[in-house]
Amino acid sequence: MMKSALIRIVPSLFLSSCSLFFGGRGRNGRSETTGWDLSGPAGVSQVKIRRNHQKAGPGLVFIEGGTFVMGRTREDVMHDWNNAPTRQQVHSFYMDETEVTNIAYREYLSWLKKVFPPTDERFSKIWSSALPDTTVWRHALSYNEVYVKNYLWHPAYNYYPVVGVNWLQAKRYAAWRTDRVNERILIKSGYINERDAAEAYGADHFSTEAYLNESDASNPVASDSTARGTSSGRAVKRGKKRKSDVVGREDGILLPAYRLPTEVEWEYAAVVPSQGRVYNTRKGRKSPIEQLRSRRISKSGDFLANFKRRTGDYSGVAGWPNDGAITPSETKAFPPNDTGLYDMEGNVAEWVADVYKPIIDESISDLNYYRGSTFTKVMREDGKTAVINETVTYDTLPNGKLVYHNLPGQVRYKALGDTAEYPAGDYRDEGTPTDRAPVAGKAASRHGELRVVKGGSWRDRAYWLDPAKRRFMRADQATSWIGFRCAMDRVGYKTRGRTRRN
């Protein structure tokens, strides 16, 4: 009798245990730690339990993180001695498949002109401040007017990398791209429509950070049911969903910000980490610094990158062997590296996020090394996220050119530093606090600081095609041989498509 009862009880206990276990995995909506129904009625803790793997944003390629040796041990013919080898660990991230092209940048310019028309006195300088400097093509003893007039605008150059963009402008483009991509995600998901996006907060455009900071569950004001509804002025979903439903960080729907890659990310992606690297010896497709021409039978002798051969030789002789480009070439004109990225060696050099310093000291950080951190926090007014209204501030560069610093609708940030909570908020100089104002939150006082430039270009010798080489340029300067591409953080497990709990 006892044995029979036990047989009936044990399976019951087993099923109950399984139910609780799988509940935390999202099988039946119950918590594996408390047993509560996580999607229950009001008054019960409602927690999102689905596992939402991050998707790659438009134009991005997934780069799985790992360890590698950054820098080089080759003879330093330039006598810079500025990149001694250090071993670094890099998080997984995403990077643009190609450099940002002219047509992509013109989309940005077109949006600025439509949303902030230059005919409106309030916004009269926004569009012009974002324009690339096309005069970078001019040289006293060269005839390059065809590029001055046509390179940015003519459709023949649509898919050529944009140049003439300084570091500050590249950073503004990345911020704009973040908002447009996330705005489109919300529209496609039915949470907002285009009219709502334009009218949110009474601003002139949708801002990802403004939206999320009002819906962030960690914010006691925003997490209140009334603050998450229409009373906050937020655009909300129309249809079957409750009107208080808005997208928060806990939903995992919106993407992290587009940004400039860090120096360590750029170099890591360029050296094909999937094949491994020990100092400058690596497997997989060799870089042009080691192999300038293809060894494939069908492509034998073809150049693998766009670079300068020697004095007076930018492309080779007419016909074969010719790389087809005297100046920048169309993106994807040469084979990608093993991670699927194009033109990481040659075509145009690229801005990265880091402040330039001659020495990278592995004792400072060997995890996601980055020199340029400034820490801020969101400003709040009357319990709500503070956003910029119609006041646009500009950075004035030494050449007199203006670069807009913020746009109406964007979140206002407060610089951290010199407080008990945050003793320092600016770590751009030697890893120590400075008394200079961080860029965020006010007009930049450091627009002329040196920023790192990585990779070779159409006007460089093969020496600069080695991904380990590093140069610098003032953040407010632009040239005909520097472009940029964007990166994005990877959240969650570093390997795409699986987790340790699967």
Image (cartoon, rainbow, N blue to C red):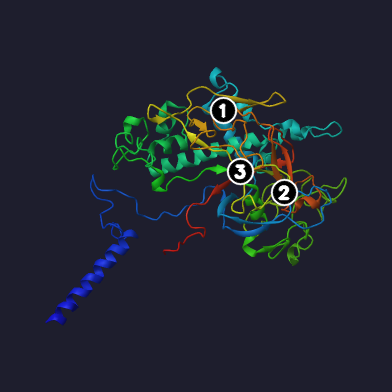
Can you say whether 11 is above or below 192 in the image? below
> How far apart are the alpha carbons under marks 2 and 3?
14 Å
Residue 299: x %, y % from top left: 74, 62
Label 1 belongs to which residue?
442
Q: Earlier in the sequence, mark 2 or mark 3?
A: 3
Quick check: marks 1 and 3 in contact, CB under 8 Å? no
**In the rendered image, which quarter is residue 402 located in?**
top right
For residue 455, the mark is 2
Residue 28: x %, y % from top left: 28, 59
Three-letter amino acid code of the residue under disc 1: Lys
Look at discs 1 and 2 and give the one toward the viewer: 1
Q: Earlier in the sequence, mark 1 or mark 3?
A: 3
Of residues 261 and 421, the one nearer the viewer is: 421
The N terminus: image quadrant: bottom left
Residue 324: x %, y % from top left: 77, 49
Quick check: marks 1 and 2 in contact, CB under 8 Å? no
Three-letter amino acid code of the residue under disc 3: Leu
Three-letter amino acid code of the residue under disc 2: Gly
Few, some or many residues within 10 Å of mark 1 (<14, 14–19, 20+): some
For residue 230, the mark is none
Looking at this rendering, what residue extends furthest in the front direction?
Answer: 420
Judged left or right of residue 217, residue 488 is: right
Label 3 belongs to which residue?
260
Few, some or many residues within 10 Å of mark 2 (<14, 14–19, 20+): many
